[in-house]
Image (tube, rainbow, N blue to C red):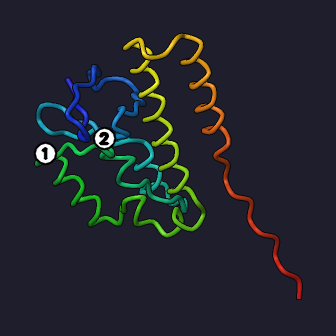
Amino acid sequence: MFHCVGCGTEIPWDGESIFSYTCPCDATLFSDEDCNVAIPFSILQSTLSGLKRPLPHLGDLVGTSDYTSPEKERLTSELKERGFIWMEECTGCLLDGRLERRNKRKELEKTLNQVATRYRLGELTPEEALEETRIIQERSNNLKYPTPAPEKEN
């Protein structure tokens, strides 16, 4: 049985076939009982193909949860030694707005979860919950990539 390196959750995969999964903690690194890590295709593609592909961010590999373990700390350290960085450290993500959009989406996701909880507790009617959900989804859909400014002519 495999588990998520990012949060420790067991993953029902036997390691035999092709596996593509992102844990709810955002991690894509999973290991078995013997700490053998299943390498995501994105890392193989970035490091072995010879193509100029950006490396995935650390959060895409070890997740974004506060969970810690010796295994997660070791893998994070090894990945940092190989040039992987957190999205918050990525100049490109800061400059083009990807980090800001990700943070806004995470905040909207929290708000959506709060709506679901309030509905389950009977604080919202079905109609109110649907309307709040619609508004949150509309805000999320409006988080567009910025349009680059036109180049100035001399």
Q: Amino acid at mark 1?
A: Ser
Say left or right for 23 vs 77.
right
Local SS, label 2: loop
In the displayed structure, 28 sits above or below 87; it is above
Q: Which disc number belongs to residue 69?
A: 1
Residue name at image x 25 percent, y 34 percent: 4
User: Residue 154 falls in which quadrant of the image?
Assistant: bottom right
Q: Nearer the viewer, residue 80 or 41?
A: 80
Neighbourhood count class around disc 2 (C-alpha, 10 Å): few under 14, some 14–19, many 20 upward: many
In the displayed structure, 51 sits above or below 35; it is below
| Residue 90, position as x, y percentages in the image | 45, 65
The residue most toward the front is 123
Q: Would you name the residue on which mark 2 appears? A: 29
The residue most toward the right is 154
In the displayed structure, 84 sits above or below 69; it is below
Residue name at image x 41 percent, y 11 percent: 122
Q: Nearer the viewer, residue 77 or 16?
A: 77
- Mark 2 and mark 1 lie on one chain; the one further toward the N terminus is 2
Residue name at image x 19 percent, y 39 percent: 36
Q: Nearer the viewer, residue 135 or 53?
A: 135
Q: Amino acid at mark 2?
A: Leu
User: Residue 20 falls in which quadrant of the image?
Assistant: top left
Say left or right for 138 vs 34.
right
Neighbourhood count class around disc 1 (C-alpha, 10 Å): few under 14, some 14–19, many 20 upward: few
Local SS, label 1: loop
| Residue 42, position as x, y percentages in the image | 45, 46
| Residue 118, position as x, y percentages in the image | 41, 20
- Give the distance between the C-alpha atoms of the residues marked 2 and 1, in whole angstroms: 14 Å
Q: Which disc number belongs to residue 143?
A: none
